[in-house]
Every structure is written in C-alpha cells, then in structure tokens.
Amino acid sequence: MCVGVDGTAGSRALSQPGHINSAAALCFVLLAGTLPAQQSSQTPYTLKARSELVLVNVTARDKKGALVRDLTAADFTVLEDGKQQKVSSFDIENTDAVPETAAGPEQTTLLAPLKPRAEAKPTEAQPQRPSALKDRRLVILFFDLSAMQPDEIDRSLTAAQKYVDQQMAPADLVSVVSLGSAVRVEQDFTSDRALLKQALNRLNPAAGAGFEEGSTGATEGTPDTGQPFTADDTEYNIFNTDRRLEALRSVAGAVSRIEQKKSLIYFSSGMNRTGIENQSQLRAAINAAVRSNLAIYTMDIRGLQALVPGGEAQSASLRGTAAYSGRATQNALNANFSSQETLVTLAGDTGGRAFLDTNDFSQVFKRVQEDTSTYYMLGYHSSNPARDGKFRHIVVQMRRPGLKLEYRRGYYAPADFQHSSREERELQLDQELASELPTTDLPVYLATGYFRLADNKFFVPISLVVPGSEIPFTRGGDQDRATLDVIGAVTDENKRPITTLRDTVKFNVRGSQEVRRKNVQYNSGFVLPAGKYHLKFVVRENQSGRLGSFETDLAVPELKTVPLKMSSVVLASQLQPAAKRRNENPLIRDGSELIPNVTHVFSSGQHLYLYYEVYDPARQSKEKQPGIRLLTNVAFFSGKVKTYETPLVEAQQLNVPDRKAAVFQLDVALTSLKPGFYTCQVNVIDDAAGRFAFPRLALLVRQ
C-alpha cells in the first residue's frame, strides 16, 4: 500500500554531466514485516551522549596469568590521546568475595528498554542502583534462533541448563535473551535458577525460525538435489545479518547505564557477511558494546565439524568437477571460515573471546567467570572538552612492573549537532561519506539493479529505506515537519570517483503518527556503463543529527558476452502514479512508477509485481511465424517442492523497440501462497535461439 503525502519531497540531484540522470521519489510503506523491529524510543543512559565520566575496566594478571587483587588507585596511570588524565573514581569488583549464602537482588529490570511497553507490569522489581550490583557478575545468554537449526538450539539450551545447574556462582546475575522474529527478553537478570530454567525451557527447537544462509547463483560444487539452479539470496542475507548485529547493538544500549562490566554469551551457528555490506552495522555493534562495557563471548554451537571431501553421507553427491579437483573442499573450508570470522571480530574487539570448533560448550561459561572474577573500575573526566565525535585512544599504565593489563582501548567522544553551522553539517556528511568507520544510528537499507538503455549504457535504480519510526517530527502550524539529507557516491573498482548525489527531502504531513508506522523509501538512479562499482549512501535526519549509511558493490555486466541478454529482476508490491519526468527510468511506464521492495518481505494480502527486460532476442526463421518468440513465467518453491506456478506468457514482438527490449511485468496475487520462505524462480526462454535463463530470488510471505 502506498499513501499520499500532503506537502513536497525535494528532488535535487547533483551530478557530473554524462554520468548520472537521477530522479527522486518518496513514498511510505508498511513497516510491519519489512525491516528489523525497532526498539522503544526511550533513549538509555550512554557514555557517548549523556556522560562526561569515562569508565575503564581493567583486569590485571601476573606473569603466571593469576589475577592481581591488591592494587590501588595510585598504581594506575591513564592516558587519553597521549595526555595524562586524573583518575576521579576507583572501585574494585570482586565477584569471588560473594559468599554462598549471600542475600542479593534475586531479580532486576536492567533490560527494561528492550521490553515493549505492553509487557511492563506494576509488580516488576524496580531497577537496581549501581551500588546494589557491586561484586555481581552480569551475564546475558543470547540465543540467536534466527540462525540455528533445531538440533543446534537443543545443544545450546543443554549447555546453558548445565551452566545453571552446575557452574552458576553465587555472584552471578543471569538474563536470557532470544532473537527470533524480534528481540525478546525471556528472563531479566536474576539469580533464581528456577526462573532461568523456565526461560530456557520455553526456547525449544520448535521455536527456531532459522533461515539457512547459502551460496548465491552458482551450482558448481553444490549437492545435486534435482534443482539445477541456486537461489540468489544475497540481498536477503544482507538484511538478515544486519538484523542480528542490530539486535546485539540494542542489548548493549539497554545495559549501558550500568557501570559494572557485563558479559554476553552469543550462541549461533556462525554469521556470514556478504562482502562489505554489513561492515557498517558490525562496527556500530562493536562500538555500542565498547561504550557499554559489554564483552561479547561468541560460541559456535555447531561444534567440531568434519568437512568430508566429496560431501557427507547424508547429502547428495556434488555437481561438476569440483569434487575431483579439490575446489569443493576448499570452498567448504572457506565458507566455514567466513561464517566464523565475524564471531571472532565481535569477541576480539569487545574484550571477549570466540569459542570455535569445540564440543566442550562449558568452556565459555568458565572463561566468563574467570574474566570477571576481579577487575578494577577507573573513572576520569576527559581533559578534552571538544564534542567532535572522534575516536580517543586510551592507554593504562602500571607502576608495578611485570603485570599484564586487559582493558578497552578507546571510545568515541560525544558530538553536538544542534550547535553546528550549515558548513559544518555539510562537512559532516562529506566526512561520513569518506569515512571507513560509518555510524548507523539511523537504520538505512539499500537495493539496486541495472537496465540497458543503449549499447554500454545502463540505468541503475537506487532505493533507500528508512523506518518512519526513526524520523523525528516537529510541529509547524497544522502540519508535522521533518527533513532528511541524502548524499551518495559511486566509485569504480580502482576507487576513482564516478558520480555523486546530494539531496534534501522535506516532509510536510498532517499526521506524523501514520508515517511512524511505515517506512520512508527514497528512489533515485544513475546512468552508468558496464563495469564494477562501489556505492555508498549516507542519510541524516536533521532534528537530532543521527546518521546512517549503507555500502554495497555493484557489477553491471557486459551483455554482449551473455547468451540471453537480460536485466536484473525487480520485486515490488506497489505501483504509484508518476508525473512525466525527464529521465530514463524504465520503472516508470504509462504514468505509473514501480516501487521496488528492498527487503523481499511481503504480506499475504498483497500483489507481487515482477519486472524484468530481455534484450536483442533472436528472430524466427522465415518458415515460421516472423518475429520473436519469448516464453516466461514464475515458479515458487518451498524447499524442494514447487508450490505455485503462474501461466505461461508469450511475447512475439518488442514492446520497447527503441531499446530493443521485451519488457515483462507480471502480477502475482500472494493469496495463492501460504506464509513462509520461498524461492522465486523466473523462467525465461528464447525459443527462436534455444537459449534460456532461470534467475532465482529468495522472498518471505508473512501472514
């Protein structure tokens, strides 16, 4: 559904002549089921935004690795960017000092920011003061149900239950958090073993909603299951990984107001990143954990894996020659390493540790208890008053020689947006566009494709999505107003700039509540030749100055070498009226504009529109009917079973002759499909030339 907006949407685009021809469109789409669930708008206490006191947790060990417990404030020297700081607060946290019969807080509400307001109960315990948590070990058991199979969920729950029964110490306050369709607090921090076991029992294998991340496009070296093509699920996996990293970031933000060190044990079956697309969200999650004094311990619950050459006995034999050349085994090893690389990064950069390739799942609990047995908490007020948002390096030195110190290496200084000038705001956008460490305070998602306009000239549509709930509105007269700044750049594979885009989108709506329930989608486009490119876009909302960015690589193919010349396939659920514009956007036809669905998530009551083009099809011989003969339809697979197939469509002539293209726009009523995950296969056959293509895309149909 697309609804109108009272007001205007700015559509200025700065470009280099001959490289870009862009147009901007703005629409609101339903939020539910399309983007990761957003958390409550309540902003928790964070070091970066609300506090001038910088806290550093330090663990000291001697040459034998034993913890040192007799240090004082005078033994420490703290440097920030090379300048010595005055330590204004000093505390020792010693969880080993808590006796077996200690009477402490049995249950707290530290994770309240993650809970929907409807779940708040008057009888819930009040949030604990920092002094009430002294000498307590705060442990979060995070179960990523979206990335584990039922047997993996069972193994992780068994390990957690064993910890609760046998390893849980008197000082331990444990919480249980899960990620399925949304982040859910199964149990807030408690020392009550019965409550923890009840929460773990609710997370049974039937609750797993995992979507197995797979390879994209190629069939060489994959099991021969009777399906000769592999779904292109790259785009879905980008958002799936972003969603998991955003969940970790949300948990870190929820506990940031607690000064003590926190430990999060992340149970998953690996985490795949698609190129660099998830890099921004990964860095943001790590930075949020560092600011919150949260150490992430990652546990690959798949355990010790045996990667058998040629495939395992329970799997089908492999296709192609990869099994004989060793390439299949090498690809399996690379895929396993890739799924563990992000786990290692999360753990190493937050002060935790990754546990991989082991069947002894109790090691992670033992390591958490050892690392939080005794540590020193140092606090200082930075001598640098600048609120520039830059990274500040921290170095802790000891007067006592021979000790090994473990602590976080820095933090990001607070930044003030409202007091910045117009030039400073433009500079902020330019710096963010060039930065290797982008911020993701504002969630942004991007989708693109390519359509041939002429020889070696392609239109590349760009769709940016921002949740409406993340856009703050101000009241002006009888309307609610807000603005978004958009900046983007395209570089080639040698990092040379190709073209840029700069736009400001203005909102004037009579009721912002409706917008907050939906997504805001910005559509634009570039004209590029064939080649490999890197795209980066930055979006900023101009009330609080929050920024979000998205990066991706794009390969525009040279179609002269392709047997069947075909564009990318666009999935959409909306058509909206479009004024005639001076651009070459193929998605605007007959006064209507097709709005791409960025996340490939649809509701069962919607229509699925598929748009694609075939170029330079062969003509039939004189004996047959003159003209072309293209056959196409769409099939939907649930696993290995074909659940639905559309009627065959035949094209006998080019309907866009100036571009030598046969354009297809199919309309599928999703009431024909039950809710669930599907592989959408587009079948295209050039009957005259005997050539064919079967692109596949992953999509989700929700109730």
Image (cartoon, helix red, strand yellow):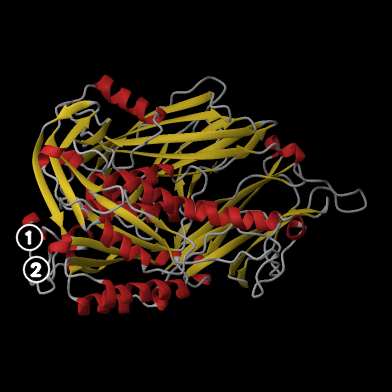
Give the position of the N terminus as an image quadrant: bottom left
- Quote the CA–CA distance across marks 1 and 2: 8 Å
Q: Which mark is residue 147?
A: none
Give coordinates of residue 117: x percent, y percent.
Answer: 17, 63
416 to 333, vertically: above or below: above
Name the residue carrying label 2: 104
Residues 306 and 10: in front is: 306
Up-down relation of residue 98 to residue 75 (above or below): below
Identify residue type, mark 2: Gly
SS label for mark 2 = loop
Q: Position of residue 5 (x, y in %)?
A: 31, 44
Looking at the image, tell me whether mark 1 or mark 2 is earlier in sequence order: 2
Asked whether the residues under the numbered discs 1 and 2 touch, taking CB atoms below 8 Å apart as contact, a structural biologist would say yes
Picture quarter with the C terminus:
bottom left
Residue at horizontal 13%, vertical 40%?
Answer: 379
Residue 132, numbered label: 1
Circle 2 Cα neighbour tier, 10 Å, few/some/many (<14 / 14–19 / ≥20)? some
Task: Please give left or right for residue 657 compared with residue 150 in the image.
Answer: right
* Spot occupied by residue 152 in the image (x, y as percentages of width and height): 45, 71
Q: Is residue 346 above or below residue 95?
A: above
Classify mark 1: residues with Cα within 10 Å, few (<14), some (14-19) or many (20+): few
| Residue 123 picture quarter | bottom left
Three-letter amino acid code of the residue under disc 1: Ala
Q: Is residue 573 visible?
A: no
Nearest the viewer among 92 and 241 is 92
